Amino acid sequence: MPKRKATISARECVACGCCVKVCPKSAITVPKGICAEVNKALCIGCGKCAKECPASIIKMEVAEP
């Protein structure tokens, strides 16, 4: 099964921080309170952030090798 990684739509993110709270690897941050960013090296593709996002803007996409 291909590895998945979280991707966040920067245009739609409201920086609520819900995704940050549920990420088990602390792969998501909200620098300067503007929008969430994913550290692809830390993301394990669990999908918890996508399920928690109230705006449904976090997508799990197949990571490039």
Image (tube, grey):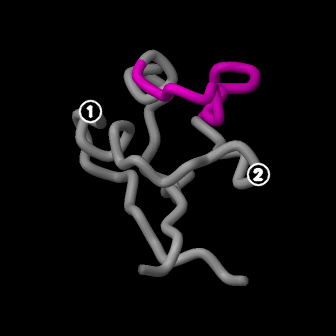
Residue 18, horizontal then vertical, whole percent: 38, 22
Q: Earlier in the sequence, mark 1 or mark 2?
A: 2
Spatial separation of the CA atoms under disc 1 and disc 2: 21 Å
Residue 52, horizontal then vertical, whole percent: 26, 32
Which residue is pictured at 23% across the width and 34% down the height?
Answer: 54
Q: Magenta stretch?
A: 22-35
| Residue 48 as seen in the image, left or right of residue 62 | left
Q: Is residue 56 above or below residue 33?
A: below
Badge 2 density bin: few <14, some 14–19, many ≥20, Cα 10 Å: few
Q: Is residue 26 above or below residue 11?
A: above
Q: Is residue 25 magenta?
A: yes
Q: Is residue 50 above or below residue 31?
A: below
CB atoms of marks 1 and 2 within 8 Å: no
| Residue 2 as seen in the image, left or right of residue 39 | left
Disc 2 designates what residue?
Answer: 41
Q: What is the total number of numbered labels drawn onto the structure image?
A: 2
Q: Secondary structure at mark 1?
A: helix
Q: Amino acid at mark 1?
A: Glu
Residue 5, horizontal then vertical, whole percent: 54, 61
The N terminus lies in quadrant: bottom left
Label annotation for residue 63: none
Extreme residue in the front direction: 1
Label annotation for residue 52: 1
Q: Is residue 35 above or below residue 2?
A: above
Residue 21, horizontal then vertical, whole percent: 45, 16
